[in-house]
Amino acid sequence: MNDHIVIGSCPVNEDLVYLDTSDPQNYADMAKQCQRYIDCLRRVFGPEPTGARLVTMSFPHEFGQYCEVACKFDSNNEEAYDHALLMERNSPLTWDEPAREGVKEPVKAKPGKLLGPDDVGMSKSDLEAMMKQAVYDGVIETFCRKCGNYKEIEGDCDDAWCESCEDSTKFYNPLIEMGAI
Ligand SMILES: [Zn+2]
């Protein structure tokens, strides 16, 4: 079964981008902060094991939509669950050096090109897990082919709204790539 643990939007001692619906850029800023936090968590804890995946999750709020970083995991997979718990309990207090200096830019597709699994560091077993998810759950946790942002989309399509790009973009769907659907 799929489950998730919310990790937060940024390290606890750092300034947080607050929900502010008067600012049209606000959601994009929050999404960027989440992506920066995901990159930071991966540097600190290493890449997620198979069955676990850091994602930006969007939540409805009385005053609008906000987002936070969560670790999704397969609750039948002990290693995946342990990794999610480890990140939640030991989440960093401050940004690490690369996040602070902005050294590590998030992946961006080159003009006219789309990101593929290699560009986002997806392994063969990640891809297999993704395909199983698409077939059995009818949904798929995949990445925007323009900016690498992860989100859950329907398992039979590859078009979705990307919160980071603030645009309707192509998402990677291995079933469509392989011509299976
Ligand atoms: Zn995007």
Image: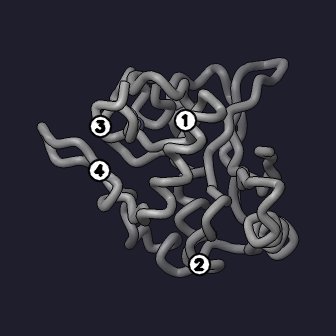
Amino acid identity at mark 4: Gly
Q: Nearer the viewer's eye, disc 1 or disc 4? A: 1
Tell me the distance, in whole angstroms, between the alpha carbons under discs 4 and 2. Answer: 21 Å
Amino acid identity at mark 1: Ala
Q: Which residue is mark 4?
A: 116
Residue 151 % position (x, y): 55, 38
Mark 1 and mark 2 lie on one chain; the one further toward the N terminus is 2
Numbered disc 1: secondary structure: helix
Would you say the residues marked 4 and 3 are in contact, meaning their CB atoms lie under 8 Å apart? no
Q: Nearer the viewer, residue 164 or 114?
A: 114
Residue 36 % position (x, y): 53, 59
Amino acid identity at mark 2: Gly
Residue 102 occupies which quadrant of the picture? bottom left
Residue 10 occupies which quadrant of the picture? bottom right
Q: Is residue 27 visible?
A: yes
Q: Quadrant of ligand 1?
A: top left
Q: Nearer the viewer's eye, disc 4 or disc 2? A: 4
The tag on residue 46 is 2
Tell me the distance, in whole angstroms, between the alpha carbons under discs 1 and 2. Answer: 26 Å
Q: Which residue is mark 1?
A: 134
Q: Is residue 12 visible?
A: no
The tag on residue 177 is 3
Numbered disc 3: secondary structure: helix
Q: Nearer the viewer's eye, disc 4 or disc 3? A: 3
The tag on residue 112 is none
Tell me the distance, in whole angstroms, between the alpha carbons under discs 2 and 3. Answer: 28 Å
Question: Residue at 84% across / 18% down in the picture?
Answer: 62
Mark 1 and mark 4 lie on one chain; the one further toward the N terminus is 4
Q: Nearer the viewer's eye, disc 2 or disc 3? A: 3
Mark 4 and mark 3 lie on one chain; the one further toward the N terminus is 4
Depicted 110 relative to depicted 100: above or below: above
